């Protein structure tokens, strides 16, 4: 009996350990399949966005260039998958991009990024959505003009600082594509890597969050939004998420759960899910306003709250007012703007964006499009703050902890080294664009210090 009991126990233990192993194996296979679908979506959307938006601006990007810059050094595990996936760039008879397809599994539809038009850029179909799921792609020639203004050569000291950004001075492995210094309403120095020029757009990544906050500000100025009002999250008036305000969302203090720092939001960005599916219904884990947690979903929820205003005041019209004529805000396949990340723009357009804040929310002709006090609002910390080298206001990072940088300096910052540094007290905007690989970082505080020091000597 003892032997029988012992044998039974051994069989039970073996089975106990065998079940998790089998379950893990199934999960690994599922994750590997999903990662391939995400990687294919990443590749399709990046190829479509980089090439179609460049061509709309009158410049050329080749797939090889996109593979070298945007599709190298991305996050694991997609990085190892992306490079081996077959793709096809399909065009209309007039030569404009129709769509980009990427194969990921022989038994399933390719991933499709559809080029909609110049004002909306490219949108990613959901996994297994056929190429016409969204509707027929646009078949229109570009209506934009190329930015042919000559590159502005910086004076000697400033030129040295700009050159250093391309030489690895501010971060080993960092890859700078463009730098601009804008002072007194004018570009006083700029430089581009060989394959890029003033009309070449790049994805803003999280610089778009500062653009989103600015669109909220414009709605507030028109009387169509209130930062202290509920953002209307949740299902009923009794839902505790109704206590979340636009201010909470802009300050990343909604108290909603996030599964990773920043919510990588891969299902939305690369999986073809919608903003509504992926970003709006996360549960509360803390009282609104009680904790800081940087989250894509908070910005997406803030944009969703002002979505009704886009019928009469779309982002494209706002960009036109600012002279940002080479900028595109893209959407999910249902037309919801992904303004936490998915904007394509040029370095010069970002300098114009920064100038709006130097002008206290006014256009060059004096027309106010942001509320009085909005610059102070976005640049003032309120409530919980992030750990680390930078503070946070409302949609903008604060450089109030950076030695040698004026205390009023604010910045829009994005993945892969996108920076728009705004220094109101010195009437300066500094733009740095990059395609920094995972593991590399660009020291924007040191670069800002060196640029400002160079300006003092000129």
Image (cartoon, rainbow, N blue to C red):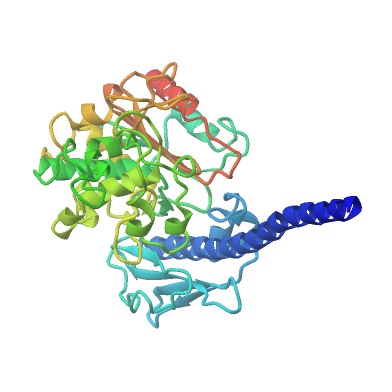
Q: Which residue is drawn at 19% across and 41% down?
A: 230
The x, y position of residue 416, in whole percent, is: 50, 44
Q: Is residue 315 above or below residue 418?
A: below
Q: Is residue 13 left or right of residue 96?
A: right
- The single residue placed furthest to the front in the displayed view is 1
Q: Taking the image as drawn, is residue 330 in sight?
A: no
Tell how many labels.
0
Horizontal relation, residue 258 to residue 255: left or right: right
Q: Residue at x 34, y 18 (%)?
A: 407
Q: Position of residue 232 (x, y in %)?
A: 21, 47
For the point 34% across and 79% down, the residue is 136
Return the x and y of residue 40 as percentages of the image width and height. Answer: 54, 65
The extreme top residue here reads 403
Q: Is residue 375 left or right of residue 62?
A: left
Residue 312 falls in which quadrant of the image? bottom left
Residue in front for this viewpoint, 368 or 18: 18
Question: In the rendering, at what x and y percent does residue 51 appear?
Answer: 45, 64
In this view of the protein, can residue 21 be seen by the observer?
yes
Q: Is 135 drawn above or below residue 53 in the view shown?
A: below
Q: Nearer the viewer, residue 308 or 378?
A: 308
- Quarter of the rendering containing residue 338: bottom left
Vertical side of 396 occupied by 119: above or below = below
408 on left or right of 88: left
The outermost residue toward the right is 3
Q: Quadrant of the C terminus?
A: top left
Q: Which of 150 and 115 is in front in this view?
A: 115
């Amino acid at each position: 009996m003892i032997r029988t009991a012992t044998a039974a126990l051994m069989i039970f233990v073996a089975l106990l350990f065998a079940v998790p192993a089998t379950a893990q194996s199934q999960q690994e296979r599922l994750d590997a399949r999903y990662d391939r679908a995400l990687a294919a979506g990443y590749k399709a959307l990046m190829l479509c966005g980089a090439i179609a938006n460049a061509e709309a601006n009158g410049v050329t990007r080749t797939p090889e260039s996109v593979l070298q810059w945007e599709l190298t050094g991305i996050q694991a595990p997609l990085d190892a998958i992306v490079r081996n996936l077959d793709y096809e760039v399909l065009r209309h008879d007039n030569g404009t991009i129709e769509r980009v397809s990427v194969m990921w599994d022989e038994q399933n539809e390719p991933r499709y990024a559809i080029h909609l038009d110049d004002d909306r850029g490219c949108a990613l179909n959901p996994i297994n959505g056929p190429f016409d799921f969204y509707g027929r792609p646009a078949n229109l020639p570009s209506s934009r003009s190329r930015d042919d203004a000559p590159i502005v050569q910086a004076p000697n000291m400033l030129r040295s600082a700009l050159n250093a950004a391309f030489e690895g001075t501010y971060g080993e492995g960092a890859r700078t594509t463009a730098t601009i210094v804008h002072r007194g309403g004018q570009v006083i120095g700029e430089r581009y890597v060989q394959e890029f020029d003033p009309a070449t757009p790049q994805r803003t990544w999280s610089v778009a969050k500062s653009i989103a906050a600015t669109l909220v500000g414009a709605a507030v100025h028109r009387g169509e939004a209130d930062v202290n009002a509920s953002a209307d999250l949740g299902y009923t008036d009794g839902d505790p998420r109704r206590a979340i305000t636009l201010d909470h969302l802009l300050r990343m203090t909604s108290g909603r759960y996030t599964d990773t720092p920043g919510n990588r939001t891969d299902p939305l960005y690369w999986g073809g899910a919608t903003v509504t599916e992926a970003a709006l219904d996360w549960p509360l884990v803390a009282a609104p306003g009680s904790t800081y947690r940087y989250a894509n979903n908070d910005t997406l929820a803030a944009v969703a709250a002002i979505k009704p205003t886009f019928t009469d005041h779309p982002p494209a019209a706002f960009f036109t007012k600012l002279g940002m004529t080479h900028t595109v805000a893209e959407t999910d396949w249902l037309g919801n703007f992904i303004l936490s990340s998915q904007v394509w723009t040029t370095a010069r357009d970002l300098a114009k964006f920064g100038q709006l804040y130097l002008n206290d929310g006014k256009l060059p002709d004096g027309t106010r499009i942001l509320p009085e006090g909005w610059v102070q609002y976005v640049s003032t910390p309120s409530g919980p703050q992030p750990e680390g080298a930078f503070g946070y206001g409302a949609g903008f990072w604060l450089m109030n902890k950076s030695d040698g940088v004026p205390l009023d300096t604010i910045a829009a910052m994005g993945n892969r080294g996108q920076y728009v540094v705004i220094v109101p007290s010195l009437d300066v905007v500094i733009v740095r664009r990059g395609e920094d690989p995972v593991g590399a970082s660009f020291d924007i505080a040191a670069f800002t210090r060196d640029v400002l020091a160079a300006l003092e000597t000129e």
